[in-house]
Image (cartoon, helix red, strand yellow):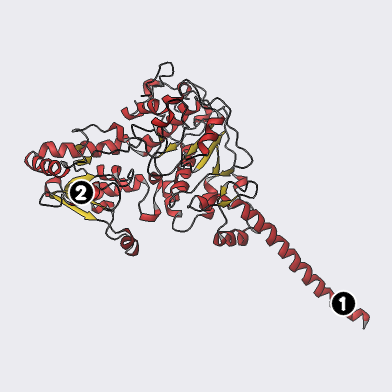
């Protein structure tokens, strides 16, 4: 009986041991998964406290993603681990000098030669504003202390980016609306794949709001903190950088820029310019901004078609009535800002219709290259707005060839000078010039976490995955970056 009892205990003990072992594995897996999910959720607009630094916001764990990672961990232990991002294989050090870009070998890191400028196309004219945007730090340089100041105070900073030897590290600072931060970071990752070995080591602070937050008037006797943002103004020091929508905007179903541009072009080709409605068209949220959009509604007469956009309704209808490719049915398009900078300018320009540009306060990286009466028709944001729109429409309908040419020039501008290749060119040159101003060697601290493309695709919500996949860079650029005059020895106007 004793031996039988002893034998009967063996399955029980073994069962208990298996349960304990399973619990231990799940606990360890959940700990690792929890640690590696911190970054994901603040990029989607949430914040809490980091365990190692209670005063700093972090990206808390998503229960749904956590369960997925825990379930996969026993079979795929490294699949969702940020800490095991592959190390880029570089055969040359990353240079900070733009003048030392390597030649056009498809695998850039394999060549140590200087760029052959005779085979490099000239960068678009608006690239020259890189010098203007970085001029405040030309003589003083950018210190670690200045970046620390940018992360604190009322500067609306959202996250820190450190690029080291082709690897990307991120640290949260504050919230971002929707998926702006996550797609901006994805853009950095694609740049590293597009130009491997060319992106310098940098540390920068990024803010993802619609309005700049570093007014020039506040720093007449001190150095402004350098903060990258989607826009700036003539009265701000914020450094403009390509916005998240170039890689997609899932919340409003806007595809990555290359795909959306092709779609708009197809929609525009369905009718000739003469066949389009001979009015000026605008559609958007009329309640946003300083009242300019509400004034625009008053222009709704025989020469203008101004429509209010109900985004809640569009979400419920799965964006059936807000496709950008279906908004090229009028001879003229209107651009007007809301409460801040608007992402819509590039889409409006792509329609082959003359753009009536209500004078913007906020400037994105490429908009400073638009030439009045060549790419756009300027409209004052005053009581003269409606009469100006009406007279522009009347003039265009009487001078169709000139109006069509204006529309084509605007469309050609975004297709050629704001192509994704030029977007990556701008990002590269801006970061290289910025890196030259740092007076310290960027080093990712222990509180930063590494991000890589595989981690994004592994834990991304299903509705975001197609946007990442369709905007992913699969191989390095086969052409050299456009030629950019660094003007490194020249003094720059900071006014």
The local secondary structure at tag 2 comes to helix
Which quadrant: the N terminus?
bottom right
> Can the viewer see residue 328 in this picture?
no
User: Which label sits on residue 92?
Assistant: none
| Image position of 199 (left or right of 24) | left
Counting other residues with Cα less than 10 Å from the Cα at mark 2, is it few (<14), some (14-19), or many (20 or more)? some
Q: Are the residues flagged by discs 2 and 1 in contact, CB closer than 8 Å?
A: no
The outermost residue toward the left is: 398
The local secondary structure at tag 1 comes to helix
Comparing 197 with 447, the one in front is: 447
x, y percentage for residue 67?
Answer: 59, 62
x, y percentage for residue 117?
Answer: 39, 21
Comparing 257 with 194, the one in front is: 257
| Image position of 319 (left or right of 470) | left
x, y percentage for residue 294?
Answer: 23, 51
Counting other residues with Cα less than 10 Å from the Cα at mark 1, is it few (<14), some (14-19), or many (20 or more)? few
> Can the viewer see residue 448 in this picture?
yes
Q: Residue 360, located in which quarter of the rendered image?
A: top left
Which quadrant: the C terminus?
top left
The outermost residue toward the right is: 2
> Which residue matches tag 1?
7
| Image position of 263 (left or right of 184) | left
Q: Is residue 107 above or below residue 468?
A: above
Comparing 117 with 301, the one in front is: 301
> Marks 2 and 1, how far apart in space?
88 Å
The outermost residue toward the top is: 489
- Marks 2 and 1, the one that precedes in the sequence: 1
User: Which label sits on residue 295?
Assistant: 2
x, y percentage for residue 411?
Answer: 24, 40
- The nearer-to-camera label among 2 and 1 is 2
């Amino acid at each position: 009986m004793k031996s039988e009892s002893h034998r009967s205990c063996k399955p029980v003990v073994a069962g208990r041991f298996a349960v304990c072992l399973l619990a231990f594995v799940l606990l360890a897996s959940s700990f690792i998964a929890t640690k590696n999910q911190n970054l994901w959720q603040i990029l989607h607009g949430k914040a809490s406290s980091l365990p190692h630094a209670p005063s700093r916001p972090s990206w808390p764990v998503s229960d749904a993603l956590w369960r997925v990672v825990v379930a996969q961990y026993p079979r795929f232990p490294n699949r969702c681990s940020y800490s095991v991002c592959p190390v880029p294989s570089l055969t040359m050090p990353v240079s900070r000098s733009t003048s030392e870009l390597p030649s056009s070998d498809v695998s850039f890191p394999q060549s140590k030669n200087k760029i052959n400028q005779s085979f490099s196309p000239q960068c678009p004219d608006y690239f020259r504003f890189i010098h203007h945007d970085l001029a405040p730090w030309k003589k003083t340089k950018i210190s670690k202390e200045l970046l620390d100041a940018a992360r604190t105070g009322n500067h609306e900073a959202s996250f820190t980016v450190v690029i080291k030897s082709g690897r990307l590290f991120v640290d949260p600072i504050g919230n971002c609306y929707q998926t702006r931060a996550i797609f901006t970071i994805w853009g950095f990752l694609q740049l590293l794949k597009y130009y491997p070995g060319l992106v310098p080591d940098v540390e920068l602070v990024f803010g993802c709001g619609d309005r700049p937050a570093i007014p020039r008037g506040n720093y007449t006797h001190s150095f402004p903190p350098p903060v990258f943002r989607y826009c700036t103004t003539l009265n701000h020091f914020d450094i403009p950088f390509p916005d998240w929508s170039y890689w997609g905007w899932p919340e409003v179903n806007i595809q990555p820029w290359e795909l959306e541009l092709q779609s708009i072009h197809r929609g525009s080709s369905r009718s000739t310019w003469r066949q389009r409605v001979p009015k000026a068209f605008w559609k958007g949220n009329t309640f946003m901004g300083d009242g300019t959009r509400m004034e625009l509604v008053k222009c709704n007469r025989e020469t203008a078609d101004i429509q209010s956009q109900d985004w809640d309704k569009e979400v419920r209808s799965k964006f059936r009535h807000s496709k950008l490719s279906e908004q090229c049915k009028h001879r003229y398009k209107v651009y007007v800002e809301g409460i801040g900078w608007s992402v819509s300018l590039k889409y409006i320009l792509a329609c082959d219709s003359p753009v009536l540009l209500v004078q913007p306060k906020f400037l994105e990286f490429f908009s400073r290259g638009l030439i009045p009466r060549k790419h756009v028709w300027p409209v004052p944001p005053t009581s003269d707005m409606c009469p100006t729109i009406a007279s522009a429409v009347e003039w265009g309908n009487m001078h169709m060839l000139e109006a069509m040419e204006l529309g084509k020039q605007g469309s050609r501008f975004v297709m050629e000078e704001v192509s994704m290749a030029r977007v990556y060119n701008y990002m590269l040159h801006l970061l290289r010039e910025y890196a030259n101003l740092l007076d310290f060697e960027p080093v990712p601290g222990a509180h930063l976490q590494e991000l890589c493309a595989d981690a994004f695709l592994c834990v991304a919500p299903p509705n975001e995955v197609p946007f990442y996949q369709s905007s992913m860079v699969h191989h390095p650029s086969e052409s050299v970056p456009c030629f950019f005059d660094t003007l490194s020895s020249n003094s720059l106007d900071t006014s």
